[in-house]
Image (cartoon, grey):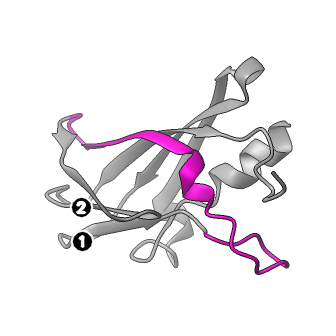
Amino acid sequence: MRATLLGSAALLISAGAWAQDAAVSYDVSFPNAAHHEAEISVTFREIGNGPLTVRMSRASPGRYALHEFARNVYGLSAVDVAGETLAVSQDDPYSWTIEGHGGEATVTYTLYADRADGTY
């Protein structure tokens, strides 16, 4: 189960930070593993001043069938480097935009992943 959760946790990416491997760090914990939940925090550094858009994959690698993994994401929030809460808007079912981050943001969310491989 943990490998599936970790794989799903890594699906949250940012177009602005994609090429900057050192500028993105993940913290994954399983405080509620019995209920198939993972707590994920992703810190994006050096992202400039424009809006940060994060997306959850809609398809599983190698299968290319739509699975809408974002439906298993909840409690998404964001803070800036000072820990101040940032406004998050959900643009569509699988992406969120964060503005006013000042070049760094930490996005935190809960992922339900009983069967996060797309087999329900």
In the rendered image, the vertical position of residue 39 relative to residue 32, given as above or below: below
Q: Position of residue 103 (x, y in %)?
A: 24, 61
Q: Residue furthest left?
A: 100
Residue drawn at the location 73% of the way across and 46% of the way down: 6
Q: Position of residue 95 (x, y in %)?
A: 41, 65
36 inside magenta stretch = no
Q: Earlier in the sequence, mark 1 or mark 2?
A: 1
In the image, the segment drawn in magenta is 58-83
In the rendered image, the vertical position of residue 71 relative to residue 41, given as above or below: below
In the rendered image, the vertical position of residue 23 relative to residue 109, given as above or below: below
Separation (CA) of disc 1 from disc 2: 5 Å
Q: Position of residue 5 (x, y in %)?
A: 74, 43
- The mark found on residue 103 in the picture is 2
Q: Do the numbered discs 1 and 2 sit on residues whose CB atoms are within 8 Å?
A: yes
Local packing at callout 2 (Cα closer than 10 Å; few below 14, some 14-19, many 20+) is some
Local packing at callout 1 (Cα closer than 10 Å; few below 14, some 14-19, many 20+) is few
Tell me which amino acid carries mark 2.
Gly
Q: Is residue 117 left or right of residue 94?
A: right
Residue drawn at the location 55% of the way across and 56% of the way down: 70
Pointer 1: what residue?
Answer: 48
Tell me which amino acid carries mark 1.
Gly
Quadrant location of residue 60?
A: bottom right
**The residue tagged with tag 1: helix, strand or loop?**
loop
Which of 54/65 is in front?
Answer: 65
Quadrant in the picture for the N terminus = top right
59 inside magenta stretch = yes
Task: Tally the marks.
Answer: 2
Residue drawn at the location 46% of the way across and 62% of the way down: 23
Q: Is residue 31 left or right of residue 75?
A: right
Which of 96/48 is in front?
Answer: 96
**The residue tagged with tag 2: helix, strand or loop?**
loop
Q: Is residue 99 left or right of residue 43?
A: left
